[in-house]
Amino acid sequence: MSQVKLQKIGNSFGFRVSKSDLELAGFDESFDYELIAEKGVIVLVKRRPHNSKWVFKNTALTQEDKAWLESKLESGDK
């Protein structure tokens, strides 16, 4: 376990982490990371690639799509 200090970096704050610690954790500059913060704890995790099979085409909405989007939905509760 390494000991680090919180440091002011420009208008932000940050921790300096040694290269060996980053390599041990499998971190490098080619990935994006997600920061999860809770009281007294900060966790950094590698962002997973998006696996969606949805494909969105750059096409205009049909009249049916527009009508559906503009309609008022009913809850079914009476």
Image (cartoon, helix red, strand yellow):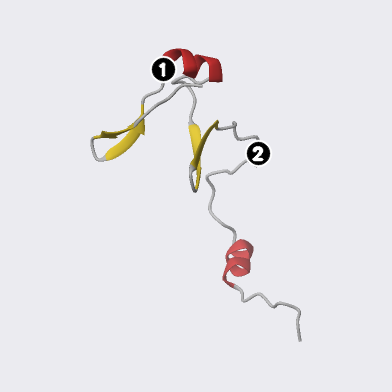
Query: Horizontally, is 25 left or right of 12 in the view?
Result: right
Callout 1 amino acid: Ser
Structural distance between the alpha carbons of marks 1 and 2: 35 Å
- Asked if 78 appears above or below 37 in the picture, the reply is below
- Image coordinates of residue 78 in percent, x first then y, are 76, 87
Residues 14 and 49: in front is 14
Marks 1 and 2 in Cβ contact (< 8 Å): no
- Point out which mark residue 64 bears: none
- Image coordinates of residue 57 in percent, x first then y, are 57, 43
Q: Secondary structure at mark 1?
A: loop
Q: Nearer the viewer, mark 1 or mark 2?
A: 1
Question: Residue, x 48% and y 17% (percent of image)?
Answer: 21
- Image coordinates of residue 2 in percent, x first then y, are 46, 21
Q: Earlier in the sequence, mark 1 or mark 2?
A: 1
Residues 73 and 28: in front is 28
Callout 2 amino acid: Ser
Which residue lies under the disc numbered 2?
52
- Asked if 33 appears above or below 24 in the picture, the reply is below
Question: Residue, x 59% and y 66% (percent of image)?
Answer: 69
Badge 1 density bin: few <14, some 14–19, many ≥20, Cα 10 Å: few
Question: Residue, x 76% and y 79% (percent of image)?
Answer: 76
Residues 52 and 44: in front is 44
Q: Secondary structure at mark 2?
A: loop
Which residue lies under the disc numbered 1?
18
- Image coordinates of residue 38 in percent, x first then y, are 51, 47
Which residue, as the protein is rendered here, is positioned at the far bottom?
A: 78
